[in-house]
Image (tube, grey):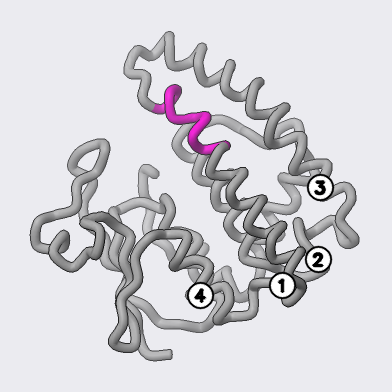
Amino acid sequence: MTTAKLYYFDARGVAEPVRLILTYGGVEFEDIRAPLVSLPPVVPPGLKQKCTWGTFPLIEFEGKKLAQSLAMTRYFAKRFNLVPQDDFEAALCDEYVDATRDLYTAWVPALREEDANKREKILEETYESTKKRFMDVFESILELSPTGKHLVGDSLTWTDIYVAVVFNNLELVTKTDLLRAHPLLKSFSEQVFNEPKLKKWIQNRPDSMF
């Protein structure tokens, strides 16, 4: 695959799984980052014209362009054999990723609260509610895993990468140890980021607030 151009903001966000999967596939890519000058972020006018839907992320490769983060993630996951061949296992991958998107949505009110005292209270309440609904469930899935290392099947999938990134990103933005009560999930995330094919990006990626 020729060099790709990935457009996003100066953040990990929903582009980080794409960056990691491209790295896993051995793809050299330009990591083009627009500055975060406001929240919610705004795509600069000069780049917005490139975007099919007027938003990031966007990737250009082989004379093509693709938008929408999950479409991009799934496309490259299939291309680099990170999607199970079994249809049901592939559907489980989709299910677990969809669950993490619900998890992220649950944290949005806490992230938007500007009053420091109120924010701290909402952060703790959100941790307690998401622990039961999401982290406990993912921990139980790993307990039943044949290897204890992968959410689906016995080898790395795009869902392992995506779920690990979501927890890592949430810990970054909330300054909360989300996995403190979940040793299997914590070990799982560390193993994903220690995958040799992903280390190149992990060790050299730019620092960012989000």
Q: In the rendered image, which residue does mark 4 sit on?
A: 76
In this picture, which residue range is highlighted in magenta? 103-111
- Whether pointer 2 and pointer 1 mark residues with C-beta atoms closer than 8 Å, the reply is yes
Q: Between disc 1 and disc 4, whose residue precedes?
A: 4
Image quadrant assignment for residue 139: top right
What's the residue type where badge 4 is placed?
A: Phe
Q: Between disc 3 and disc 4, whose residue precedes?
A: 4
Gap between marks 2 and 4 measured at Cα: 19 Å
Estimate the x, y position of residue 77 in percent, counting from the top left.
56, 72
Q: Between disc 1 and disc 3, whose residue precedes?
A: 1
Which is more foreground, mark 1 or mark 3?
Answer: 1
Q: In the rendered image, which residue does mark 1 sit on?
A: 84
- From the viewer's perspective, is residue 123 above or below residue 161? above
Task: Determine the main secondary structure of the stretch shown in magenta.
Answer: helix
What's the residue type where badge 3 is placed?
A: Ile
Q: Residue at x 64, y 28 (%)?
A: 130
Image quadrant assignment for residue 99: top right
- Whether pointer 2 and pointer 4 mark residues with C-beta atoms closer than 8 Å, the reply is no
Gap between marks 1 and 3 measured at Cα: 17 Å
Q: Residue at x 76, y 56 (%)?
A: 151
Asked whether 104 falls inside the magenta stretch, the response is: yes
Q: Which mark is residue 153?
A: 2
* Secondary structure of residue under mark 1: loop
What's the residue type where badge 2 is placed?
A: Gly
